[in-house]
Image (cartoon, grey):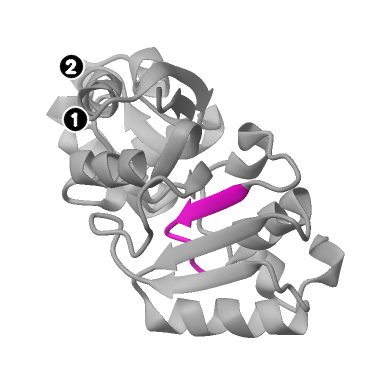
Amino acid sequence: MLATLPEGESAVSYGCGDPVTLAALQPGQTVLDLGSGAGLDCFLAAKKVGETGKVIGVDMTPEMLERARSSAKRLNLTNVDFRQGYLEELPVESNTVDVIISNCVINLSPDKEKVFAEAFRVLNAGGKLAVSDIVTEGELPDPIRNSLSAWAGCVAGAVEVNDYIAMMKRVGFNDVSVTPVFFDKDTVDSVIDDLGDMAELKSISRDEIYRSVYSAKITAYKP
């Protein structure tokens, strides 16, 4: 599938994981991608759900939507629909989606609980949420958070994993599962070394930093 993408499209992905594989999509399902960007995950999902399925991509950026629609046309994908909108107010009808995917986008929202509430609203009963996202665990000093954000792109908006899970449960999700995928230690080491001899670094061990921020594979279900 990647080989058939227009030149450059397969490289335009700002995510932190692989929610399409995590979702274990089946033919005929309706899938919603939160923050679909240039459409890569939507195109991969479209192949999984087939002609009897449907993929909806929602993004707030007109330029990304234009690029995604153009790519879908070139790929002759008729089961993909890109819509402009915000994750906190999805342009999707209630109880119409089987699976929601998202790749390192929810953490960027200023109102994550509203995003989860909207996701819950549009899912069918028994529907699945399968996202890759950045979370933290324990205290992460601001200098480290900001420096990692410059590298990973979406660490600054990350919340503590227990808060993340609590928000999901408050809106109604159950069977929440979080699997950590830790950052490469060499990359984290280079970030810490660039910060030099800061007082904040003396309050936390390097092992704690390795464990304190990570890309998580997160699944949950609507009862």
Q: Residue furthest left?
A: 199
Which dot, 2 or 1, sits closer to the camera? Answer: 1
The picture places residue 75, in percent across and down from the top left corner, at 77, 77
Q: List the residue tagged with mark 2.
A: 203
Image quadrant holding the N terminus, namely bottom right
The answer to if 116 sits in the magenta stretch is no
N-term-proximal mark, 2 vs 1? 1
Q: Nearer the viewer, residue 154 or 80?
A: 80
Instruction: Please tell me whether residue 151 is drawn above or below residue 83 in the rendered image.
Output: above
Q: Are circles 2 and 1 on residues that touch, CB within 8 Å?
A: yes
Q: Nearer the viewer, residue 3 or 185?
A: 3
What type is the residue that disc 2 sits on? Ser
Looking at the rendering, the stretch of residues picked out in magenta corresponds to 30-38
Q: List the residue tagged with mark 1.
A: 141
Residue drawn at x 62%, y 68% as measured from the top left: 80
Circle on res. 96: none
The picture places residue 32, in percent across and down from the top left corner, at 50, 53
- The crowding category of the residue bearing disc 2, from other C-alpha atoms within 10 Å (few below 14, some 14 to 19, many at least 20), is few
